[in-house]
Each structure stands twice: as structure tokens, then as C-alpha cells.
Amino acid sequence: MIRKSLLIIIASLLLLVEPRVILAYDAVEPPLRQLDINRATLEELRSLPIEEQDALTLYEYREYTSYFKSIYDIRKLPGFDQRKFDRIKPLIEILPVKEMDEEIARMNAIYYRIEEWAAQEGTNEGLIDIWIDQAKDPINVNTATITDLMNLQNVSPVDALAIVQQRQRTSGLRSRQDLGRVPGISDWGYRNARNFLRYSEPDKGLEFHGDYQFRLYNTPLFSDFDQLLNEGEVRWWDRLGLDNASPATIHKVRMRWGQKIRAGFMAYRGLGEELPLTDVKMGHTSLFTTRTFPTVKRFVGIENQQLGPLHLDRLYLGNYMVTIGQGLVMENTDFFKPRKSGFSWDKRLDGIVGDLSRTEEFALDGIAMQASFWKLRGLFFFSWDKKDVILNADSTANSYIIMTPKVENKILSEAGYLPMRDVLREKTWGGNLRYSPWLGTHLGFTFYESIYDRPFIPKLSTVTDRRDKTTAADSEYLNSFESPHGSAGAEEWWDDYRRVYGVDFQTICKNISLQGEYAILDKGRNFDRQVELDGNPQALVLSAYTQYNNLNILGIYRNYDVAYDNPYCRAFSNYQRLKRTIFEDEFYMTNPLYAMVFDNSAQPQAEEGFYVTSRYRVSQAFTPQLEFDLWKRKADNAQHMRVVAKIDYQPIYPVRLQLRQNYLYRDEDNTLTATSFKNIDTRLRLRLRISGYDELETIYVTGYTRWPPRPRLIDNVEPDGNNPSTGNATSPSEALGISMTHNFNDRLKLRAFFGIYDGFFWNFEDSEFVVLDGESYRYWFSVSDRISDRLALRFKYTIDQMRAQSYIDTRNFNDPFGSDPEGSNVRDENRSYRLQIDYSW
């Protein structure tokens, strides 16, 4: 009895002195002020007596699902049992919050990504629109198809399959934590996929949302275009008034009703383009004349509709984009992207989507539909549009041409040239049927046909009168597509066509993805002719991809016949079509504008080669990456090799060092092509991250391009077969720049750059990719201001000051020339601006 009483007294004393000795971790003293978890930062949530993952669960539920209405909402979250709930209950409180629109809340959470996407254009413009919409209104991970997941930025086929398999094994994914625990998903795939996914159907119905974007800029054309437009007797630069060019202007509106209905409108005028006069008619009666934008696009689409056993994936009227397989048969864009693999940053959207990109020449305008039934997926499209082409003297079509800027037919006629704008009518129709025997595997069959009101006949005499300057590389043009009937006297429709057939496949097994596509261009002369392999140009792409959590490897083999002239092919290649042909030399063209056939070519060059790239995250501080490409240009058998090594090193958190070494080589031992070269380029970036996400960055670039000896530059050429040591040509380049980023707050940001370059220099500036050549000082600054939750403004101003130069012609067609300068101490200065306004509702 005494012992029992003594134990009770001791226990009571311990409770008075230190209650935690008895109650340990489960009893927590209420703080002087409780934490409002509807407003707490992630760091404040981490201060609660819970695990790191639990704090993240609270934060992500509040940010991406809903504010807490009751303290007992926490009990419903995964990982919060009764004991854990009782532990934090005295420490927290729930104060009411006026809930903002869900899309605005998501924009606030990942605005840094949306801001980056919204400023991009060109090759990924169609994809960017989709990603922005999905970031604001995510797709349900538990109902998304494997194709939907593969279309997300930086989500690999292996990641997509792992997600679908995990949701089949379980009752579905309920949170980001479930997504992060998916077996087989890479860290890179998880961190990108989470921005586009939700884990249940939204409570709201078909809410109406949209985005408006306005861009105004006068960024100068690349130096190659400056030279082209100043060539010849016509001097298009002066005729088009490009010294005081009208700025490029874009108006773009995207609208959506939930995830069921989408619509869009875009009006675009390129730099230096006029607003042409257009007759507004009712029937055959002209009502009035007005000025319109050269490029106008619009669409309306229906998505995700269940029609009995048939699932209507997408149905679009108006302008749309179609991408199938590896882009070997069909991918309609005006923009060429080197080494477009379909992986990582080089995504290729599979299927159809509304098109508000700046693509005009290869835009499709009509109807497109994609539907699924059982293990089948069908895709069909039809388009009727006008195209820009070079005309031969007999009014036949010579070649497609993408003009920059677009020159109206009236101006061409005044200069004595045949019209090129909208002179070819094209009907294009086709489709793809895909069978998926099991998850992650499919086999597809693709076909399309284009029918023209003019036959295509590639006549070299139309574009140049210097046939003596052609080389073996020009066989790529000489083997261009020629219409089967090849006559201007053929019937208006159906007699002049181009048909392409293809087979594509993909299979994913564990952490390996294999895919490929084979295509054939049918050159038959009868409508009912059977497809034959012999005599018909062919093309093939095969690729293999494997990934681990910190390592991925991609290998690609491609082989395209020289005569595989498919204008809608955008498959993997290093160079664009007509590289090294006479089209590179605008001074040999009968009209300098014809050189744009190469300069703006979107088709891949006829190549055969193997490409491999790998990225290995050794540690959080050290990530090397390697690219190796060995290929042959089919037109003249010129061998090429490209090696790029990258190192990303972060010794301590604020400091990041990035080194890029590039080596590009063309074989000297080729009797068909005498012009070999070696290019070496080194780029070093040093980034210092400061508080508040501010950043300082320094970039240094050095390199050179070396050609074989060219003695004609200093003396008459002696055809003795020797390689004199004099006349060697090396073009060095060097650049140095420093930039800074300062965030005044989470809505207002300033970026600035100063640099000097000598020679060839390319760089990413804020939201623009620029290619420069010369000796200049360069300054720019940009201001990004998110004025409100729905309105954002972005402005960039650039000054490029050329250093003083003197121009002396030392040679005149291989004969010595006087040394009197054409210009002494010539200076030039270019100023440009870019304004962008984005509004969401």
C-alpha cells in the first residue's frame, strides 16, 4: 500500500515538472498563436510536429485542390491518422479565405512556367498552347490515355506507361504523393507531369475560360536574310522599305468550355509585311474593300465525347495540326528544328489539335477527327488551302516557298516577276488507323494525298541561269517531286497529285521504349496503281529509348532517299533540305527571293546516320550529357560528325557552372564535295543565384570554323593539284556577356544584358533566340510585370552597336583589285523592341 502510494506521488510530481516525460510526443502545448494553415507557407507547415511528406500533403491540397473549410478536412488526407491529427490539432486553426478561381490559383502556383511558355513561338508554338491550357485546367490522371500522358512536356513513354499501370494496379492515384510513388517513373518525369494532372474530376461544370495574347515586335531578320534581300538589281530590302519596316503583329484568342469545347482565332502580320487590300463579297458581288492581315487562322473543336461504344477524342473545324508517328509522313509546320527526336524538349504532339501557330504555308484548313473504339484509334483529315509556290514560265509549279517577309503579287509584278502568293490550290486528305494489342504497344498505318490545280515540275532554269555552278549536292533539288502527269495541260483536279504511305509502331517494355516509322512516296501515274517499292522513294526512322531514375539514353537511326520529297515530313535530321545546294547562294538566283526555298525549308535533308544522346545525373551537384551524331548526306555522300559534351556542375547551392563543348566536322576525303570544314565551339556559363530568386550570369564563347586552303583569295589559282599553305581560311568567333535578373517582388521582374561579340554568335535572350554575326556591342533589358492575376505585360528593348569597320574589295572574280576602301569607319546601330500582353479570363 505504501509502495503504491509512493508511485502515485512520484508520477504526480513528474507531471507537474515535465508533462512530456509521461505524455511524450502525443501531447503538445497549445502555442500562444495558432498557425492558420490556409495561409501558412510551406516552411511554416514544416515546423509542425509532422513528417516532411505530411507538410507537403497539406500544402499541395491547399494550393491545388481547395482551401480547408474545417479542421477535420485534414483527417481525410492520406497519411493523417487519428494520432497524427490529435498531435497538430491544438497548434493550428482554420480561418475563412475568399477562394479565388481555380485556374488563377494554379497560375499563381506555377506562373514561372506559364510565363516562360507564353513567350515562346516557332517550332513548339502549337504545343505551348496545349501545355498552358492543361496547366490551368489539368487532365484527370485516372482517365487520361497513355497518349495524353506522353504528350505532356518531358514525360517519356516509359513514364506514361508506368503511371497507367500503377492506376490499374490500385484504385487510382489520389494525390501528388501517389504520383511520386509510381514504380518506374523518373524524377524528371514526375516533376514535369505534376503540373498538368489532377486526381479527380472537377466539381465545376463547363466553365468558360480563355486567353488573349498581343505581340508587337520589330526584331531584325537574321543576317542571312539581310544579305539575301540586298542582293541583285531589284534590292528587295529597299523595295519593301525594310529600313523602316512595319513591326510584326500578332493577335491570338483561345477559348475553352471545360475540357469539352475549344475555339481560337489568330491574326498575324510578319515584319515588313503590308496589310493587303481584300474585296469583301456577297456571292459574286463586291461589297467593299478593306485591309486585312496576311495570315488569319481560326478553329472550333469538340473533345472527349462518349458516343455509345465510340469515344470521340477530337473533332476540329478550321485550322488544325496533324502529327503522326515520327513525323515521317505527316507533321504540318513551317518551322524546321534540328534533331527533333520527339523526346524531352523536342516533343512531337501525337494526333490532332487546333492550330493558332504562325505556320501558313503548310497549314491545314478544313476538318479533322480522331476517335477510339476498342483497341483501335482512327484519325482522318481533309484540307483545302492555297499555297505559295515558285511558278515556271509555263505556269507549272516549281517548288513550295516560305517567304520572310511575304511579298504580295502586286509588288512581284511591278518588279517583273511572276506571282508567288496563293497561286497553288491544294486539296489534302488522309488518315491513320492504329491498333493497340496491349497497353504501351501499337501498330499504325498512315496515308495522305495532296491534289493540285497545277503540276509540279522542278525546272532548274527557272531559279538560276548558272547551271555551271551546280554540284553533286544539287541532286537533292533535281530529284524533287514531279507530278505524274507533268503537264500544264492536265485536267484542273485529280490528275496532279502526291501520295505518301507509311507504317509506324511503338512498344514499351519496362524501362525501354522502341518506336519507328517507314514511309514511301508513290510516284505511280495511275490513280488505281498499286504501291510498289521499286522505283519509289523511301524513308525510315527507328529509335530506342531507355531510362533509369537518373540516367537516360536515346538512339536514333534515319535513312531518307534523296527523292523522298514529302513537304509534310518533319522527321529527325541535322540539316534542312537543300543544304549546300545552289539555293544557298542567292546571288546565283534569277530572283534573290528564291533562296528562301532553302533558308526557310522545313523538310529534313536526305541523310543516313545514327544519333545517340545520354544524360546522367551523377549527383545533385554534377550532371554530364553527351550527344554523338554520325551521318552521310545522301545527295553527295558527304560524311559528317557532330559531338557535343555538356557539364552542369553546382559545387554549392548559389553557384552553377555550365560548360558546353561542340565539335562539328565534314569529311575532306570526298571527291563529290570539295568543301569540308571543322567547327569547334566552347561555351561557358557561370550562374550565381542570390536571395529572392535574383541571379547574375556570365557567358563566354570562343570557337572557330576552318575550311580547306582557298588561294584565290590572295592570288590566281594554279590548277596544279597542290594545296598551298597560303589562303587558308579560318573564321574565329568570340563573345563575352553578363546578365542579371532582379525580382522586385513576385510579380515584377527586370532582366538586363551587356555583351560584346566578334564573329558568329547565337544566344537565348529572355524569350528570343538570336543569331548574330559581326563585331558589335549588344545591350538589352526586359521588364515582366504581372499587373493582376489575369493581366501580364512583357517588354524588351535591344541595342546592337556595330564597331567601326572599313570595307575593302581585294579580289574581283579572281583578279587583283585595288585597295581603295569602299567605306571607312562605317558604323551601324540597330534598335529593336518586343511588347507582349497576356490576359486570361
Image (cartoon, grey):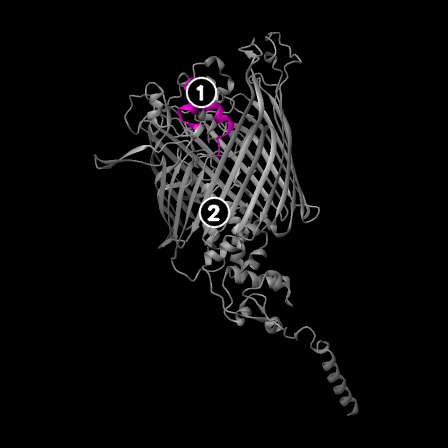
Relative image position of residue 820 (x, y in whole percent): 56, 12
Residue 362 highlighted magenta (yes or no): no
The answer to whether residue 699 is left or right of residue 521 is right
Residue 285 figure quarter: top left
| Residues at discs 1 and 2 in contact (Cβ within 8 Å) | no
Residue 234 highlighted magenta (yes or no): yes
Relative image position of residue 345 (x, y in whole percent): 54, 42
User: According to the image, label 2 marks what residue?
Assistant: 793
Looking at the picture, does residue 72 appear above or below residue 43? below
Name the disc covering residue 263, or none.
none
The answer to whether residue 628 is left or right of residue 531 is right
Q: In front: mark 1 or mark 2? A: 2
Relative image position of residue 700 (x, y in whole percent): 65, 35
Q: In which quadrant will I find the N terminus?
A: bottom right
Q: Residues within 10 Å of mark 2 (few under 14, many from 20)?
A: some
Give the amino acid type for the residue marked by disc 2 in the picture.
Leu
Q: Residues within 10 Å of mark 1 (few under 14, many from 20)?
A: some
Looking at the picture, does residue 643 appear above or below residue 715? below
Nearer to me, 694 or 448: 694
The answer to whether residue 218 is left or right of residue 49 is left
Name the disc covering residue 478, or none.
1
Relative image position of residue 261 (x, y in whole percent): 37, 51
Query: Magenta stretch?
Result: 219-242
Kindly state the secondary structure of the residue where label 2 is placed.
Answer: strand
Q: Which of the two labelled residues, at mark 1 and mark 2, occupies the earlier sequence position? A: 1
Give the amino acid type for the residue marked by disc 1 in the picture.
Leu
